[in-house]
Amino acid sequence: MSKPRAWRSPEEIRKCRPRPVTDAPFEIPDSKVGQLDALLHGSRVLELIDTELAGRPGPDGLPVRTVLVGLLLSLHYHRSASLADVCRVLLDELRAPARGWLGVPDPGPLDDHGRHAFTRCVYRSFDRLTTALDPFRCDRRRRLPADAAALAVAAWEGVDDERVRRRALLQEISDRLVLTTVRLAHRRGMFKGWRGDVGVDTTPVPAWHRPPSRRRNLASVEITAGWHFCGGSDEGIFGHSATLLVAASRRHPTGHPQAGKRVSGHPQLVLGLVLDTPGKRIGPNAIHALTKLVPFGFPAGIPASDRAYTDQISEHFAQPARRLGYQLVLDYKQEHRGIQGTHQGALLVDGSLACPAMPTTLAQATNGLDDDAVRGIDDNVQLSEQITAREPYFLRLKESADERGAIRLQCPASGPSPAVACPRFNQVHQIPAPTAGRRRPHQPAGHRRTHRGQADGADPPC
């Protein structure tokens, strides 16, 4: 069967595209303007901005609320955050009631000079906002020399009280804008059945401006931008790095009536966003976003992350995440799988502490395997059985984290429901062996028997 002629000819394709039935400009419904305006007021960022702008000299220009609502409308309908598109939206695409809400003049009587004056008001209002929030104000209309840009970047990273306060204020505004949709979804019960699983990722946000030039010794207009390298790529992307938290879902054989094989039907919303220079504060940014979810009372589930977080030192990501109650899922490199070390006699096997009596074949089941073999575990029956056989040997949580963040683990052979039967544990704790006249206690079928020879001379942390 041959394709229709219109599918093969670009000219015919352009003729088939739908055309507007009128030459009048597009009009945005008042309901959408009111919805985004209410969303902005619900985030309570205008309170922070008005407090910061109070008492500043110079003309006020348009209200900050008008410019921010115009930005939201431009992003929603045109996928653009350009101030030129914001001016076009406010002047040409709003109806009379919405213009009255936002204080936008009627574009009918305005000539070219009037439209230009309104555009200057928009730019002045936005410039006034960025000036008040910028930790270190510099000339962003041209490319600075490399040494001058280095001083500006150092000032951004400085520990001066005022600059630290402004950086925290910028992040607070970003958090409130992101979490307002999460708060609405939570209030309407959309997260019912969600187990608290999140996906943690750092994704590039390309910059509009050119990167620094070594030949001309000029920096970029975006002085805080850098090169972001995605996993497995040798070509970097110039811009910023965005740390994102996304509500994830587990799979289940029976699934959910509306969500298919997903366990719950919650929306996969963005739960946190931190924008930063690439390569800086990767772990702390994720912990900041996770901490902002604590007031919602969400369960602490499984945060799944890539190797950018595996390479973080434990004090930056792993330990704070576990203090919050999360069970980490990390992606290890080929040379890091299997037995990774010891801690007070316990084995560290693929990120979890285990009894040193774990058989070597189970502890080294993933040693040397490539990514395709580990991620295709469902197709490898032998590897799947070995991973399942590891479970009884892992140390179990005895007490939750205290005020210092320390947790206590117990031997799998201890407690009222031991997972393994260990002769060494019985000897250390002087547990009497069953006598001839007494019935031997019942041993669950799932118990594993350990032998002292398997511990390689290390005593289990009983």
Image (cartoon, grey):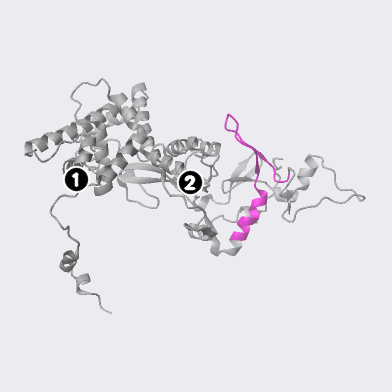
Q: Nearer the viewer, residue 460 or 405?
A: 405
Reply above or below: 394 against 51.
Answer: below
Which residue is at the far front? 97
Assess whether residue 190 is covered by the magenta stretch.
no
Gap in angstroms between the C-alphas marked 2 and 1: 35 Å
Assess whether residue 388 is covered by the magenta stretch.
yes
Which residue is at the far bottom? 1
Q: Which residue is mark 2?
A: 191
Q: Local crowd at mark 2 within 10 Å, few (<14), some, or many (≥20)? A: some
> Which percent across, then down, holds residue 191?
48, 46
- Image quadrant assignment for residue 112: top left
> Can residue 141 be seen in the rendering of this structure?
no
* Residue 114 numbered tag: none
Quarter of the picture containing the C terminus is top right
Earlier along the polypeptide chain: callout 2 or callout 1? 1
> Which percent across, then down, holds residue 195?
53, 47
SS for tag 2? loop
Magenta region: which residues? 384-413
Name which residue lies at 24% across and 21% down.
56
